[in-house]
Amino acid sequence: MKKHKTIEIFLFIDALGWKIVNDHGFLPELLPYRKKIDMQFGYSSSAIPTILSGKTPAEHGHLGLFRFAPESSPFKKLSRLGWLFKPASFWNRGRVRHHLSKILKKIYGFTGYFQLYRMPIWKLGYVDYCEKKDLFIANGMEEFANLHDVLTSMNAAFHISDWHLSDNENYIAAEKAIANGKNFLFVYTASFDGVLHDKVQDFTAVQNKLDSIKSQIEHLYAHAHNYADEVHFTVISDHGMTPLTGTVDIMKAVEESGLFFGEDYGVCYDSTMARFYYLSEKSERVITEIMKNFPGHFLSENEEKKYGIYRIDRMFGDTIFLLDAGIQIVPSDMGSKPLNGMHGFIPENEHSFAAILSNTVLPESVKHVADYFNLMIERAEKL
């Protein structure tokens, strides 16, 4: 096969934070051009659509996976059958929840990432889910053009990973795509995030995983050189990982306040923030008073605008209470136990910053996770 002049590879490594890159000295020789990047406020559910479109959550509508929205909930009929899902001790088991999520995903025709986590069945009738469609495929973000859409319009010879596959499968698929003539690749890997959630404070375990990733990168890089005169290789991430320092039970405090869920208030308890919706006059006053007992603060309008999550319609919550870095809500709608590491704290925390690493000079304009999108399109246009 005739060689390309250049092959562009963008490898996404979930949770490869700037601090981790520097603490472990990750690939300085192969990827000498590197920058600390401001994370997109929120979780992967907000960062991934931002990376794939260049839009903020305020624009694309993805922050937490769930949002309080009784009027648009697709789960109303299911929540009325809550009595079928007893005892809770059985239905809250991780493996049971996983299989139930797969069944519901098929029933509702969702093609995006879908997990119930610990969201109570009875509460489902009050919430909507943000990622009903596969964000990586054509028209995956509806009114916004995503990476797939733009590359298609450019007639680019591109490959985008299937996020359903394992990291190893996506590396293999990338090698096959190169052999089949593709010269722009977006390779998705997620397993590093899982390692950090469990072992972020275990230096040796993290180093071992990074060594494995390094070997895979070097192999893919060498493979690409068989098909191109030049290989531009860039690693991007969405956020870092903050070690656990404590937990708080916000859920219990609010439930014991005398307010009624669905009548006085709505709320989504993410791992690091509580997003409140006020339905009665007294609810904001009562909840504001309760939250004075917890380490954190309500985001100001200026902060929401700075972080790209401010919406006039208050889709993400009338107020958003963000915990101090390292503190997790337990239990939450995401889980009943704390994880050793978590992301989704204030972006300015030293553990929050993302990273971009490349063997090609990086433009000054790349400062935020949202900037990856334009960088990828600019590189693709030069091929």
Image (tube, rainbow, N blue to C red):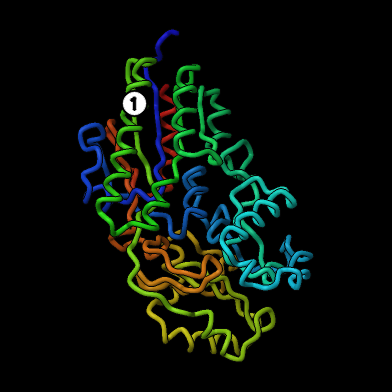
Horizontal arrangement in the rendering, residue 46 relative to residue 378 (left or right): right
Of residue 345 and residue 96, the one placed in the foreground of this image is 96
The residue to which callout 1 is attached is 221
- Can residue 143 be seen here? The reply is no
Residue 212: % across, % down: 32, 38
Q: Position of residue 70 (x, y in %)?
A: 71, 69
Q: Does residue 75 sit above or below 186 in this rendering?
A: below
- Picture quarter containing residue 80? bottom right
Mark 1, Cα crowd under 10 Å, few <14 / some 14-19 / many 20+, is: some
Please determine whether, in this image, residue 84 is positioned above or below residue 65: below
Looking at the rendering, which quadrant does residue 185 occupy?
Answer: top left
Residue at image point 44% right, 31% down:
171
User: Residue 165's x, y, as percent?
Assistant: 53, 38
Q: Residue at x 43, y 46 (%)?
A: 191
Which kind of residue does numbered mark 1 sit on? Tyr
- Label tally: 1
Which of these two is toward me, 301 or 98? Answer: 98
The C terminus lies in which quarter of the figure?
A: top left
Residue at (52, 54) in percent of width and height:
45
Task: Answer above or below: position of 189 versus 201.
Answer: above
Q: Secondary structure at mark 1?
A: helix
Where's residue 56, x and y in %?
Answer: 49, 53
Question: Which residue: 31% across, 29% down?
Answer: 218
